Image (cartoon, helix red, strand yellow):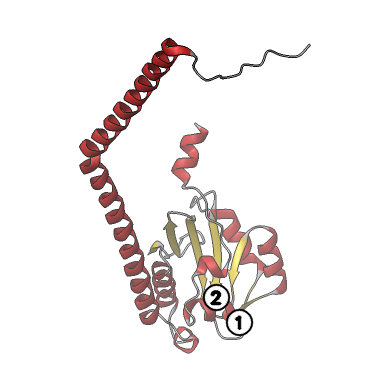
Amino acid sequence: MGGIRLRLRAPRGRRERVAAAIVALAVTTMLVQAATGLWRAIVRGWPLMVAVTVAALLAAISWHVRRVRLRRAQAALVAVLQFPLDRIDSLGDAEFEVALRDLLIRDGWSAQRVGHAGDQAADVIGRHAQRGRIVLQAKHTTVGGKVDSKVMYQVKGTAGPVHKADVAVVVTNGGFTRDAKAWGERHQIHWVDRERLRQWAEDGVPLHTLLRLPARRARRTAVRRAA
């Protein structure tokens, strides 16, 4: 059974024509009133709209200016903090630790040298808003010197439990034994040998880029959410 179809027809007679005219006039009046109200609202609200738009533009410009200044400052810092390997080779142990601290600061970490007798395998500790807490163990040696697995064991045993580190790194101006590299990679102890140190210190490659450190949430935020 088919549905009922409604068909519009032209008004018939004088009364229907008058009624149609009244309805059309009412609809037109409503549309005019709605348009008038909208226009008045726009006119009344335009200062706020302009203010919001200007504030957004100023915020965007300010953010862009800060980014440009930060990049220029970092570029200038990289130009100043470049340590040739021959200069690093001539440093003493404490001077080597200071140089590593300065390189971390150049890369955007807040860092301090903490190396001393009984430092429990931590010479430099740094913090980064996106990459957490880092511990560096510095091993200044001769050009052909090798860091063995024992150093990796020590760093693994203290980096997390003692220093609450998210990232642990052993840095040397020499090299690492094959076992030390393999053990470090299995147990998340990063290593920076002479070639990587050259890229970090001479070429200005940030340490987190060199080691491919992922961005992570700050420790406090993670603990708070877990609670």
- Give the percent coordinates (x, y) of residue 29: 32, 24
Q: Give the quadrant of residue 106.
A: bottom left
Q: Position of 151 compared to 42: left or right?
A: right
Mark 1 belongs to which amino acid?
Gly
- Give the percent coordinates (x, y) of residue 64: 34, 62
Above or below, 48 against 148 in this view is: above
Q: Give the quadrant of residue 105.
A: bottom left
Residue at the spot 38% in from the left edge and 76% down from the top edge: 75
Of residue 52 and residue 195, the one placed in the foreground of this image is 52
Q: Which secondary structure, mark 1?
A: loop
The N terminus - image quarter: top right
Q: Position of 174 compared to 76: left or right?
A: right
- Give the percent coordinates (x, y) of residue 166: 53, 53
Residue 203 disc label: none
Q: Which secondary structure, mark 2?
A: strand
Residue at the spot 43% in from the left edge and 68% down from the top edge: 107
Which residue position is annotated with label 2? 172
Q: Are marks 2 and 1 in contact (CB under 8 Å)?
A: yes
Above or below, 51 against 44 in this view is: below
Q: Give the quadrant of residue 78.
A: bottom left
Decide which of tag 2 and tag 1 comes sooner along the chain. 1
Mark 2 belongs to which amino acid?
Thr
Above or below, 86 against 179 in this view is: below
Which residue position is annotated with label 1? 145
